[in-house]
Amino acid sequence: MPPARKKRTAARRKSSGSPAWLWLLAGILIGLGLAWYLLSRGYIPQPRVEDPVESASPAPAVDDEEVAPAPAEENRPRYDFFTVLPEMEVVVPEQELSDKGQAQAASPSTLSGSYLLQVGSFREVSDAEELKARLALLGMVARVQTVTVNEATWHRVRVGPVQGARQADELRQRLTDNGIDSLVLQNPD
C-alpha cells in the first residue's frame, strides 16, 4: 500500500490593494470636502442666462402690397384665449373695492355682484391643496381650479363667491390679517 498523503490546503490569494468600500468612502469624503471648500469661499453655482442676440442689420423696408403671409403662420392655430380671458376675469382695484363697500353700506341695494378671491396659483397640485387646507383651518371654504395656460398646467386656489363688494373687502382683509395675499375678481357667472 502506498503511504497516505497529507491533504494540502489551497494557498490563499492575498488581496491586491484596499477593499472597495474604502475607495468609496475616500471618494465621498473628497467630494464633500471639495463642496465645503467651494461653498465656504462663496461660490454658489448660478444658472446661465443667455442674452438675446440682436441682428446687426435692420430688415429691409417692404411695401404693404408685396407682403404675403408666411405659410408657417397660416398653419398655426388661432387661439382666442387672449380675448376670452380678459372677459372672464376682471381684477377689481382695491380703491374701487373700498369705494363700493362704503357705497354699499350706505345703500345695500344699489351695488350687487358676485366676487371671487384668488389666493394662489401653483404649478404643483400639492401646493394648492396645502393652501386649501390652511384656509380650511381659518374656516374658509376654498376650491382648487385646474387650468392650462400656454401648455402649462396651473392650479388656482379660490375662495368664494361672495355677494357684494363689502363682503369681498372684508374677506380680503381677513386673508391679509392671516398673511395671505389675495386678488379680488368679479365672478363671471
Image (cartoon, helix red, strand yellow):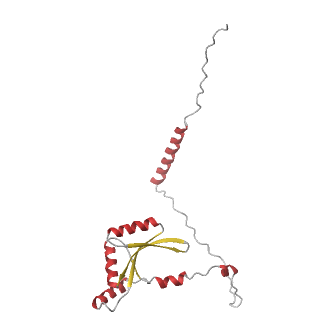
Left or right position of 32 against 184: right
On the image, the x and y values in percent for residue 40 come to 45, 53
| Res. 8 image quadrant | top right
Identify which residue is drawn at 62% across, 75% down. Answer: 54
Pick the quarter of the image with the C terminus.
Answer: bottom left
| Residue at the outermost top position | 1
Left or right position of 183 against 154: left
Identify which residue is drawn at 60% across, 20% down. Answer: 9
On the image, the x and y values in percent for residue 181 come to 37, 74
Q: Vertically, is 66 above or below 160?
A: below
On the image, the x and y values in percent for residue 121 come to 45, 72
Q: Vertically, is 140 above or below 16?
A: below
Whether residue 58 appears in this view of the structure is no
| Residue at the outermost right position | 66
Q: Vertically, is 122 above or below 35?
A: below
On the image, the x and y values in percent for residue 91 come to 42, 82
The number of numbered discs placed on residues in the rendered structure image is 0
Pick the quarter of the image with the N terminus.
Answer: top right
Q: Vertically, is 148 above or below 63?
A: above
Q: Nearer the viewer, residue 79 or 66?
A: 79
Left or right position of 44 against 68: left
| Res. 171 image quadrant | bottom left
Whether residue 85 appears in this view of the structure is yes
Identify which residue is drawn at 50% across, 41% down. Answer: 25
Left or right position of 70 against 124: right
| Residue at the outermost left position | 106
| Res. 2 image quadrant | top right
